[in-house]
Image: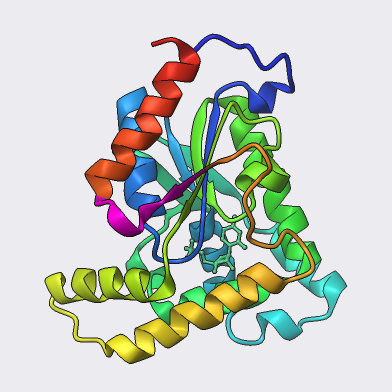
Amino acid sequence: MPDTTGGHPAALKVVTLDGPAGVGKTTLARRVADALGIPYLDTGAMFRTMAWRLGPDGPDLDEALLRDRLAGFIFTLRGRGGASVLSCNGEDIGNEIRTEEVGAMASRIAALPVVRECLKAAQQRMGAAQPLVVEGRDMGTVVFPGARHKFFLDAAPEIRAMRRYTQLQTMGEAHDLALLTEQIRSRDEQDRNRAVAPLCPAADAIIVDTGNLDIDGVFGVIMQHIRSRDGL
Ligand code: C5P
């Protein structure tokens, strides 16, 4: 990719994918990273890991103590494309963080400025060291405002809940659709209305309504924009 950003090194080869829970960001980030041959970073997994490791009392810790604990989490990324692996303090991050309960805990700690500050620095370090596809909530607005390609994916909560329901069913896990819809709505509410780095599209992001598209369709739209902007 040629550098036409003239910006900060962290912005050179960063593709940001932001959007609410359950919109398909992880699947798409992997595929886009595969197509571009660069690593992908799931920043939600960083918030989830912190929430999981801090435990239920995390959000109530005294700020200085919390800052200390957070400084002890060192994230590293290796590999590329769909085979990118994120680890924390030398341990690969596993499926234990993938439940809706941990997602809700992550959303609570994600509202704390000290947590965002600490993760933003780690994310920017990774983006400065290598080209990246990054997915999250504030990648295009706060962490990589100078990113070359920015996308914001959206879909109604009912559609996202139904997708998740189908995905869980395929994995042999039963779930209540009404409860999933409720959980997604409440996480949306929390993520969109927090004071720091709320979920919203960057002014220069391409907004993709995924409601009527399957994963292949969204992937096609994203790659078409990237290729046309980069003259590939
Ligand atoms: O994307 P995922 O569902 O794994 O993210 C879990 C939670 O982490 C989100 O609901 C959100 O509150 C928080 N998050 C965030 N900023 C990011 C990524 C995730 O606030 N860049």
The answer to whether residue 160 is above or below residue 211 is below
The answer to whether residue 95 is above or below residue 132 is below
Q: Position of residue 107 (x, y in %)?
A: 59, 73
Q: Residue at x 69, y 62 (%)?
A: 198
Q: Nearer the viewer, residue 55 or 2?
A: 2
Instruction: Judge left or right: residue 227 versus residue 140.
Output: left
The answer to whether residue 62 is above or below residue 28 is below
Report which quarter residue 110 is drawn in: bottom right
| Residue 142 visible in the current orientation | yes
Of the four image quadrants, the one with ligand 1 is bottom right
Report which quarter residue 187 is drawn in: bottom right
Task: Give the color scheme: rainbow, by chain, secondary structure or one colour.
Answer: rainbow
Q: Position of residue 4 (x, y in %)?
A: 63, 12
Instruction: Count the marks.
Output: 0
Q: Nearer the viewer, residue 1 or 54?
A: 1
| Residue 79 visible in the current orientation | no
Q: Residue at x 66, y 86 (%)?
A: 57
Instruction: Judge left or right: residue 66 versus residue 97.
Output: right
Q: Residue at x 33, y 44 (%)?
A: 218
Which image quarter is the C terminus in?
top left
Q: Magenta stretch: residue 95 in it?
A: no
Q: Magenta stretch: residue 213 in it?
A: yes
Q: Nearer the viewer, residue 173 or 224?
A: 224
Report which quarter residue 13 is drawn in: top right
Q: Which residues are magenta?
A: 207-214
Instruction: Judge left or right: residue 212 versus residue 13.
Output: left
Q: Position of residue 142 (x, y in %)?
A: 72, 46
Q: Position of residue 17 (x, y in %)?
A: 50, 45
Q: Residue at x 36, y 69 (%)?
A: 160
